[in-house]
Amino acid sequence: MFDRNEVYQLARQWVVEAGERIRSSIDNPREIETKSNPNDLVTEMDKKVEEFFASKIRSCFPGHRILSEEGFGDQVSELTGTVWIIDPIDGTMNFVHQKRTFSISLAIYHEGIGEIGLVYDVMADQLYHAQRGKGAYKNDQKLDRLPKEKSLNQSILMLNTWWCTPNHIVDDEKVRELVQTVRGTRTYGSAALEFAYLAEGIVDCYISFQLHPWDMAAGVILYHEVGGLTLQANGQPLTMVKQEPLVAGHPMIVEEIIDRYIRLK
């Protein structure tokens, strides 16, 4: 049986504990490696934090599976049973270079449904958290639901410059037109925090073409709890088991962005 409250309480406790460990060693020398390219960084702390979560989960919930970034998870191709989706440090480049604006992202899906989402801004000590059907919170403050209406020309858009991916090339002219349509653009360097900012209502829409499940799983749950919509860039639902180009935003503008501006070649 899946006891959501028990899982939530332990997950929240572990996230805060992991954040305290990171903060206490933030100025220590780092062991930095690269993965898929010179800008795809991983540190010893990423690995230690993921190992910490994996050990806790397997000790308390041996039947649960783990989908994660740094090698301590399982082979997960579908969200049957209970699956923990973890990014131990989302925004590793910020962690290495700036020592801030990075997060711990932890989501729990049960039989394909997002039940719990936790995004912890470690250095600010701000925990964004949600349980399905209970709303989203920033620490103890409940976040407001999105307004009923939103127009694109009154929206702040988050996006990055990685338009070209192995499977997709975005129409630069359409993206330029979109940027000229919205009120402004932002990039923060941590996808999980970017979803938290969507849920908080300080930005309005988000486009990214290279996110993995661990980058977005918790944030999508948060955003859904305030009325936000996240789809693949082709308009299909997310699967949460593979890398998927996505568009997130107020329901009134997501389809407009996909239909008018995101042209995958």
Image (cartoon, rainbow, N blue to C red):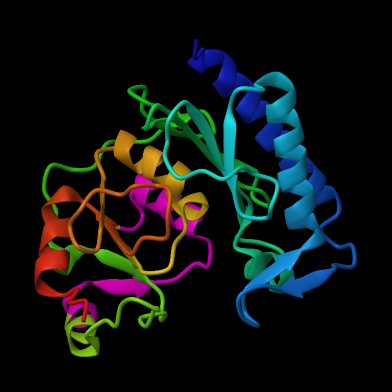
Q: Position of residue 98 (x, y in %)?
A: 69, 70
Which quadrant is the C terminus positioned in? bottom left
Q: Position of residue 95 (x, y in %)?
A: 69, 64
Q: Name the outermost residue toward the bottom.
A: 173
Q: Position of residue 97 (x, y in %)?
A: 71, 74
Judged left or right of residue 19, residue 81 is left
Magenta run includes residue 186: yes
Tell me which residue sits at (29%, 83%) in the image. Answer: 169
Magenta-drawn segment: 178-203
Asked where in the image residue 25 lies, by quadrant, the reply is: bottom right
Tell me which residue sits at (17%, 77%) in the image. Answer: 263
Judged left or right of residue 34, residue 28 is right
Judged left or right of residue 131, residue 36 is right
Q: Position of residue 155 (x, y in %)?
A: 22, 63
Q: How many marks?
A: 0
The one of 242 and 14 positioned closer to us in this rendering: 242
Q: Name the outermost residue toward the right.
A: 29
Magenta run includes residue 156: no
Tell me which residue sits at (42%, 36%) in the image. Answer: 79
Asked where in the image residue 164 lies, by quadrant, the reply is: bottom left
Asked where in the image residue 171 lies, by quadrant, the reply is: bottom left
Tell me which residue sits at (39%, 78%) in the image. Answer: 165
Judged left or right of residue 7, residue 144 is left
The one of 226 and 116 positioned closer to us in this rendering: 116
> Is residue 137 positioned above or below 187 on the image?
above
